[in-house]
Image: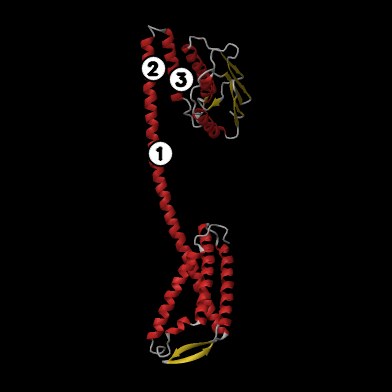
Amino acid sequence: MLKHKKRYSFWKVFWVVLGVNLVFTVLGFIALSVSPMYSKDFNWNNLFTRHYLLSQLISVAFSSAFYFFAVNSYYALFYERRPASDYVKPTVIAVVALAAYFAFTYFLAISKKITVSINNSKIEQELTPALMVFSYVISSVFFIGMALLIAYLTHLRDERKQRKILEAQKMQLEVEKSQANFNFLKAQINPHFLHNTLNFLYAKSLPYSPELSEGILTLSDIMRYALSEGNAKDGKAPLKDEIEHVRNVIKINQLRFSNKLNVKFNVEGVVNGATIIPFVLITLVENAFKHGDLKSTEHPIDITLKVHDHQLYFYCRNKKKIGPKELSTGIGLDNIKKRLDLAYGNNYCLKVKDESDFYTTELTISKL
């Protein structure tokens, strides 16, 4: 029954039961001491007899174990919203445990008699089986009823507390959503400003330097792609646009180095109609330009893209630079992996081979 995490620990139940038992015991003895009928025979020393202390110890131990089991079991049923039929098993166990406890305490009792008051006189009466059964039924209803009540009230309190936590989390999410929308708008404003500025610079540079104006125009095209693509519901862009801007990245780098770079870029297959998350291929190519030996005639940057039956294979290999290396944080590659995970799950494979002289990346997407 208690496979879940227990709502109340045994020792917490024990100390509560012990406290309640002490309070009611003291109150009972005080009531007897002031009662006209019992005060003459009352003796506070009865509190400390061996038999009385043993009976109280057994009572506290049983009550602690009983409530520990019953309250936690009923709480689990309330928490999991189980049907009424599931309450039968813990209730039967509780009834059997109470019957065993009552039988044990009856045989442990020194006297099998009780004292009742009738017309201001005390009469001793034998504990008959019928009286024992009646006492057992009343006590069982009280014990089980209390366990159910405690479990139910605890469940209501926990639900109310959890509801408040969820409401607070919902409010926090709303705040974060508003902040994200604000940041998104701000992030759009800044690139738009840069895009417009690039167009202005292109227009101004055109009469003076065709190469400079071409570089500015190419960069402006890439910025427009960054702003406009990937806005579909699935966050993907046409593969042909990604390829076009891979060529733009190559063009800008060629302009930087007066068209002296050795780059091979081959595309095979039908790319029209295919989509891909934007800037994945561009980032891999940029990484090759950043860390590669761009002027090696024997080992040019080799970029190959193949598309067949909705499957994509991308290959990029470059010879490493000789001399001081640019510091790399690896953030770009980590971001690519996270984006690929979200977009394609298990339908992709990204391999990175970092050798002493060469750096190779291979990306396979089995379902575009």
Query: Mark 3 and 2 residues: CB-CB less than 8 Å, in contact?
Result: no
Q: Is residue 115 above or below residue 281?
A: below
Whichever of labels 2 and 1 marks the residue nearer the N terminus, that label is 1
Q: Amino acid at mark 1?
A: Lys
Q: Which residue is mark 1?
A: 177
State the image coordinates of residue 164 (x, y, percent, origin top left).
Answer: 40, 52
Residue 222's disc is 3
Residue at the (56%, 70%) spot, across then down: 94
Disc 1 to disc 3, C-alpha distance: 28 Å
State the image coordinates of residue 292 (x, y, percent, origin top left).
Answer: 54, 18
Q: Which residue is mark 2?
A: 198
Kindly state the secondary structure of the residue where label 1 is placed: helix
Kindly state the secondary structure of the residue where label 2 is placed: helix
Q: Amino acid at mark 2?
A: Leu
Kindly state the secondary structure of the residue where label 3 is placed: helix
Whichever of labels 3 and 2 marks the residue nearer the N terminus, that label is 2
